[in-house]
Image (cartoon, grey):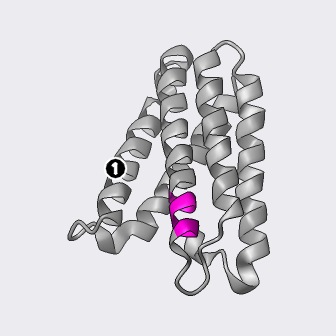
Amino acid sequence: MSRYAGGDTLALATVAFLALAGAWVALANQLRTTPDARISLSVAVVGLAGVAATPIGGPSPHTILLLVHTIGGLLFYVGTARAMMLVVPVAGTAKRPLLVVYVTALSLFALGGIGMPLVSNAVGLLQRIVFATALLWALRCSER
């Protein structure tokens, strides 16, 4: 999704990443009974801030920019996954399928990102599944 954060869509993509960071802050504030999940979501927020600050949608981004962006994305993905793992036992089994889909799609996304045959052609789709699952999980958590 970050590849679209350039040119005419840069401002919109940056606002979207920052809005997601804001949603994660709100969710972290709601999860008062699971402080470790709040910390994990805070890590994810820092990662999203890094992603928003380092757009890579232009032609051949600088290596340092790409590195900071990738580390930011990793912080977001892992922080979100850990928060999901911590909240599922507290919230019950209704959110467990979302965790399974998220972790599976994230694992395949990572394998595709390093060039694994068959999976590398679906990296964009897998990333969208990861984001959609995370958002659905956040919506389900806000129902508690």
Residue at coordinates 46% horizontally, 27% vertically from top-left?
A: 85
Image-quadrant location for residue 134 = top right
- Give the secondary structure at mark 1: helix
Magenta span: helix, strand or loop, mainly? helix
Residue range of the region highlighted in magenta in the rendering: 64-70
Question: Residue 101 at x, y = what percent?
Answer: 40, 44
Vertical side of 88 occupied by 51: above or below: below
Q: How many numbered marks have been drawn onto this rendered protein structure?
A: 1
Question: Residue 92 at x, y = what percent?
Answer: 51, 18
Asked whether residue 58 is in view, the answer is: yes
Question: Residue 109 at x, y = what percent?
Answer: 37, 58
Residue at coordinates 60% horizontally, 78% vertically from top-left?
A: 57
Vertical side of 22 occupied by 11: above or below: below
- Residue assigned mark 1: 107
Left/right placement of residue 67 relative to residue 9 reads left
Quarter of the image where the C terminus is located? top right
Left/right placement of residue 90 relative to residue 120 reads right
Amino acid found under the numbered disc labelled 1: Ser
Residue 113 lies in the magenta stretch: no
Mark 1 Cα shell of 10 Å, populated few (<14), some (14-19), many (≥20): some
Question: Residue 69 at x, y = what percent?
Answer: 57, 61
Residue at coordinates 75% horizontally, 24% vertically from top-left?
A: 30
Left/right placement of residue 104 relative to residue 37 reads left
